[in-house]
Amino acid sequence: MKTVSDYFGSLVFDDRVMKATLPAKVYASLKKTIDEGTELDISVANAVATAMKDWAVSRGATHYTHWFQPLTGITAEKHDSFITPSPDGGVIMEFSGKELIKGEPDASSFPNGGLRATFEARGYTAWDPTSYAFIKGKTLCIPTAFCSYSGHALDKKTPLLRSMEALNKQALRILKLFGSDSVKRVTSYVGPEQEYFLITQEMYDQRPDLRFTGRTLFGAKPPKGQEMDDHYFGVIKPRVAAFMEELNEELWKLGILAKTEHNEVAPAQHELAPIYTTTNIATDHNQLTMEIMQKVASKHGLVCLLHEKPFAGVNGNGKHNNWSIATDAGQNLLSPGETPYENAQFLLFLCAVIKAVDDYQDLLRISVATAGNDHRLGANEAPPAVVSMFLGDELNAVLEAIETNTPYNGTEKTQMKLGVDVLPKFNRDTTDRNRTSPFAFTGNKFEFRMLGSSNSIACANIMLNSAVAESLKIYADRLEKAEDFETALHEMIRKTIKDHKHIIFNGNGYDEGWIREATETRGLLNYRTTADCMPHLLDQKNVDMLTSHGVFTEAELHSRCEIMLENYCKTILIEANTMVDMAQTQIIPSIESFVADLAATATAKKALDPALACSYETGIVRKLSALTDRIGVKAEELKDAALSLDHAEDIIVQSAMIRDTVLGLMGELRVACDEAETLTSKKYWPFPVYADLLFGVK
Ligand code: ADP
Ligand code: MG
């Protein structure tokens, strides 16, 4: 029998394959590009392309594609075959270094937010050698960045790589100050925990809302939901287990380190977590994981729902972004150290994150903002829309001691020196688990919990890397000029704690009282919807920070703001139109049929015995008739509200109209329909209800 280690990474052109197939000089040169970002010579590219092609063809590949991540949020690929005609009428399989390095897809059908003039339809894709090429089906996929012809990023990978570079640059400056000259590179690492629902294909096909929008737009609360807490970590059903088994195999073949799987809180909800890797690869892998989850589910007669809120009344799907930074020598910079010097360095990096999260609360909120995720944030199941940080009691006490110049855990009143006396060795287990915090320190990494399940993790990590790079830059600027390094360091750490401690909150983030305290007493931001937060992407301080680190150009930021808001509006409009359609062409006619049946029953009963009251039938007929009228009216109002959006002068106004009118009407229409569902015979209801959907997979 084949073991996992036999086939792990078998579809990846990874280091093992490179070493085995490339001439030593080519391998060394490519490795230098991967590890240190040096430029690649065309002769090296040619040799790599040939080896890649031979390897892929020997595994049955016929095509190659530049695989990229446009701003649609999913991945894109255009396939070209390797064939080239040979003079004898046959073909040979060819692939050049030029084709490997650069592609020129037509960019006109991808969102660009005004970055691309119509005469300039071409875009180009550029090979990212830091993420391995892999085979999907019969196609060799080459991870690439995607830019407009004038060089503006049209994807999520380009700014992510730039943000990693910015973080590397500033972190190296800090490490130098601490005497670490041998460190060549600092990289951010991520382990994203992915949540999802599995339902049967058969039921999915009967629900236009699921098919068109990925979530249920109607559905009364089932008799049983998640209140028994019996699904979390529960026994995995055979059909789900078979899905997970095949999913793992497919992911392992692609070199994706799928590690943990379990049932989640809501019925039919599950989670998959990989072992963490560099942010860039983790992002590529997470995109692939989402794609393969859906593909494998379909082979098992299931549908994998990645929407943030597929069902009202039970938990939605999130994605926890476990983030850390480490050196090329493997030192985790967010891990408390052994020596006084290491501890001081740890505290500085910790402060850099605290400052970053506080200064750029808005960017972190923006980075997770989508129409879907707005349903989760603040709904008592996911962190609120207010960004705050959890550090745990022990670390908190350390920071407090530093701020107030009192010894930690000590009795003597002495001036605090950064060192062993300040920072005790952490007992990992004492970094208690606060599950309600948007941004929690978990011993040697931070867990950013606001991400939506369907969203690329690129956006969150771009903002996180950039904001932390900015803190480090400010620190490095000051420390490089300091006369006495230790005093300056101490003062800076103290100042950071003083200035930014209002972002630290160790209590229950789901508590109503917290939101009041956060906004009224602490002055933290509370952007409840995408329409509220997105325009702040263009606030001067954000533009200044992101452009100064070369992560985005100002034009790119304008384009992204526009695309994200457009996306928000389109998503909700499709939902509104789907609701109107379902209400008018499915729900009302079904209720009418049932009502007609009830009325006919009452008439027949009375004909049999005029003394029969038939109060049950008439009562339901009355209630359902009133509800039908309300559904009819609300559907028309929603239709009109959607139409009136055409008159909005710009996308910001349109998104505000959607937030203020369309969403409310959708809610009202839903309430009427859901009530009707509870009164209507199941035989007449036009699609599977929540109880079927949530408990349908055996
Ligand atoms: P949980 O949050 O469920 O307790 P774990 O502590 O097992 O989960 O870790 C969740 C994720 O965090 C996994 O993907 C894991 O690989 C990742 N992770 C662990 N250590 C680090 C680290 N130093 N940097 C980034 N991610 C990490
Ligand atoms: Mg977690």
Image (tube, grey):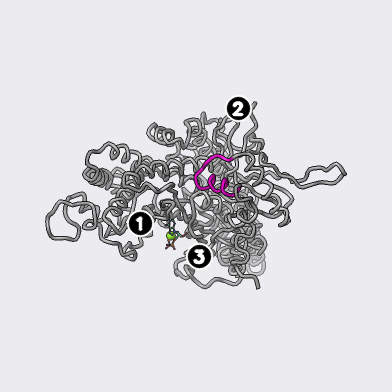
Q: Which residues are magenta?
A: 26-40
Q: Quadrant of ligand 2?
A: bottom left
Q: Name the element at disc 1.
A: loop
Residue nearest the observer in this picture, 468 or 672: 468
Would you say residue 37 sits in the magenta stretch?
yes
Q: Name the element at disc 2.
A: loop
Q: Is mark 1 within 8 Å of ligand 1?
A: yes
Question: Which tag, 2 or 3, sits closer to the chain's start?
Answer: 2
Three-letter code, disc 1:
Ser
Question: Which tag, 2 or 1, sits closer to the chain's start?
Answer: 2
Q: Which residue is mark 1?
A: 335
Q: Is mark 3 within 8 Å of ligand 1?
A: yes
149 in relation to 684, above or below: above
Q: Which residue is mark 2?
A: 117
Which of pointers 2 and 1 indicates the residue nearer the eye? 1
Are there few (<14), some (14-19), or many (20+) residues within 10 Å of tag 2? few
Residue nearest the observer in this picture, 453 or 44: 44
